[in-house]
Image (cartoon, rainbow, N blue to C red):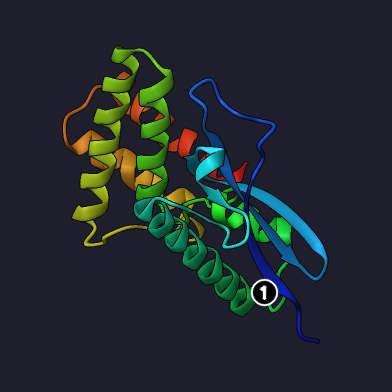
Amino acid sequence: MRSTFRILFYINKSKTKADGTTAILCRITIDGASAVITTGESTAPKDWSVKRRETKEKKTNQRLQTFRENVEQGYNTLLYKYGAVSAELLKNYLQGVGKTPTTLLALSAEELKAQRESSSAGTYRNNRYADRLLNSFVHIRSETDVPLSALTIEFFEDYRLYLKREGYAPATINSHLCWLSRLMYRAVS
């Protein structure tokens, strides 16, 4: 069965911002079900052409065309991956919902980024150091990164022994193992 797929750009004139502009929205319709997503662009209502579904500004139109291409590429990717696509699935894909790292170092970098935004400077500094040690351990094992599915209790034990050979105190070793445990907890949840 062939699905119908449409992309429609529009503005909501009733929701005008204080500066006189309104957001340009994108309605994605697949098999009659629709989802609305913001494009991140805005325009003055007088500059919007309802018939052509674009603005008078060339640069904004180019960014809208790029957005359209990203939507189409996402649709094709999901169609190839799952065989069927819904409007909500495509919307979530475009917004990055559900994109989780599948490797240890990528997960560590993402967690460190989240820590930078939410934790104190001292906590972030300690976690950044734990991340650097974990990176060096993985590279010493002659690996670029480790898939989360390949992690075992032996990996934890090898990491503990690596830290011990480097001369770290037991309390420091435990804090670095806590960072690794935190990453595993995040990977599972």
For the N terminus, which image quadrant? bottom right
In depth, the one of 171 and 30 nearer the eye is 30
Residue carrying label 1: 82
> Is residue 185 at least partly visible in the picture?
no
Residue 80 lies, with reference to residue 107, above or below; the image says below
Q: Is residue 4 left or right of residue 17?
A: right
Residue 144 coordinates in the image, percent (x, y): 26, 60
Q: Quadrant of residue 38?
A: top right
At 52% from the left and 50% from the top, the residue drawn is 100
Which secondary structure, mark 1? helix
In depth, the one of 54 and 178 nearer the eye is 54
Residue 3 lies, with reference to residue 14, above or below; the image says below
Q: Residue furthest left?
A: 166
> Is residue 108 at least partly visible in the picture?
yes
Circle 1: residue type: Tyr
Q: Is residue 156 left or right of residue 40?
A: left
At 27% from the left and 29% from the top, the residue drawn is 128
Residue 60 coordinates in the image, percent (x, y): 40, 51
Q: Quadrant of residue 27?
A: bottom right
At 33% from the left and 38% from the top, the residue drawn is 160
Q: Is residue 169 left or right of residue 109?
A: left
Residue 111 coordinates in the image, percent (x, y): 42, 35
Residue 83 coordinates in the image, percent (x, y): 69, 79
In depth, the one of 25 and 142 nearer the eye is 25
Q: Residue furthest front?
A: 46
Residue 143 lies, with reference to residue 181, above or below; the image says below
For the C terminus, which image quadrant? top right
Q: How many numbered marks appear? A: 1
In depth, the one of 38 and 127 nearer the eye is 38
How many neighbours does mark 1 have within 10 angstroms: few (below 14), some (14-19), or many (20 or more)?
Answer: few
